[in-house]
Amino acid sequence: MKHDVADLDLAPEGARRIEWAGRRMPVLKSIEERFEKEKPLAGRHVAACLHVTAETANLMTTLRTGGADVSLCASNPLSTQDDVAAALVADGIPVFAVRGEDDDRYYSHLNAVLDLKPDITMDDGADLATLLHTQRTDLEPIGSTEETTTGVIRLKAMAAEGTLRLPVVAVNDSATKHLFDNRYGTGQSAMDGIIRATNMLMAGSTVGVIGYGNCGKGVATRAAGMGAKVAVVEVDPVRALTAAMDGHQVVTADDAARLSDVLITVTGNKHVLRKQHFDLMKDGAIVANAGHFDVEIDLEVLGEMARDRRPVRRNLEEYEMADGRRILVVAEGRLVNLGAAEGHPADVMDMSFSNQALAAEWLAERAGTLEPGIYTLPTEVDWEVARLKLAALGAGLEELTDEQRDYLAGWREGT
């Protein structure tokens, strides 16, 4: 079997979504045009574990245009768009992904793409890389790429232990990825998911944002822009100070639990909302997770505390506490922007997936020459992606004069 998807009859609808997303991804399209001429990935198999969305589909076809054989599985059980998966299969790309798949099926899909013996793997959360270092040590890809903060954290832990055996490009660490995808993409799509699931009015509400990295900043900015009062929880004093100077209230997690109508976790850490916080939440409090894995909210304990549990809307489940309070959980505590919405807009994924395509090319060009470790794409790549995106936006870019370049390169003239 070369695919495992929900329903191949959904392919026409998925093809339309892929086409629409492609119109919003001009930087990736320009890379695809170059790839068509140069075929930098000829003879390579690229296996990707990414969210199966229309934007990802455009990355897959770009890699194929560059000469690669490609295969795809999901990086989250709720992030697959079944119609997109069907459209890719209809287009000849092996896909192993079904929205709502259980853990056994999820891991069987990870192994299915690894069974194809890829030369390069692409991760969003480092699940393929983890398998390559545990159960699938028989495989030796030339390298891997990593899309997200959570995955880079896992990989850096492996490198620190001395167990990392592959060169890995931390795509997330490229400026044209994390400064835009993480902030603007997560901010918009996380709020989109919560609103779709609840249909609540954000104006006048209090939104607690747990974590103030780039993703948390984006969520806080969008919530404030919709008229919400934002309370930020942080363990990093510099990030906490930044949140305060950005105009947000900075509080402890206990205080955020008491105050907030909506609590959104964006930390990449485990059980940042747990029993002590559930005990403090007001009736009707909504909790959602915008971090990669579904470990940020301790749902097992919440389930044990609840005397009743029922779905109340699509992607919204109500837990009734012993004292009658109700706590509502969006998208099973999984990545809310894909569990309850469509993920990041294509316009911002254009830059992220351009970096992914260029990272695959970078690894292919250096096959056999790189030591195991974490790598970042050269600054020149970031600049080129940014220039192409600016041009697509119709923005102008100033250039230094020769006199200005000479002045910046010297040190004698101070005035």
Image: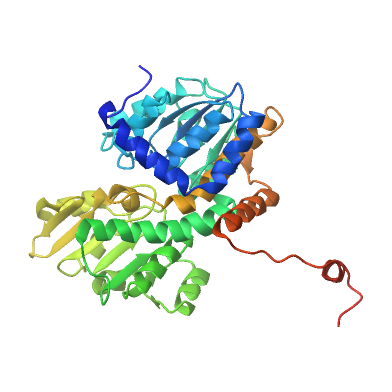
Name the colour scheme: rainbow
Query: Where residue 219 sits: x, y (%)?
Result: 39, 64
Residue 175 figure quarter = bottom right
Relative placement, left or right, of 9 versus 17 is left
Query: Where residue 268 sits: x, y (%)?
Result: 42, 53
Q: Nearer the viewer, residue 291 or 388?
A: 388
Question: Outermost residue, bottom direction?
Answer: 415
Residue 70 visible from this viewpoint: yes
Question: Outermost residue, top direction?
Answer: 1
On screen, 104 above or below 214?
Answer: above
Relative placement, left or right, of 181 versus 165 is left
On screen, 194 above or below 224?
Answer: above
Q: Nearer the viewer, residue 76 or 354?
A: 354
Q: Residue at x 35, y 58 (%)?
A: 190
Query: Where residue 27 sits: x, y (%)?
Result: 56, 47
Residue 129 visible from this viewpoint: no
Residue 101 figure quarter = top left
Query: Where residue 322 sits: x, y (%)?
Result: 8, 61
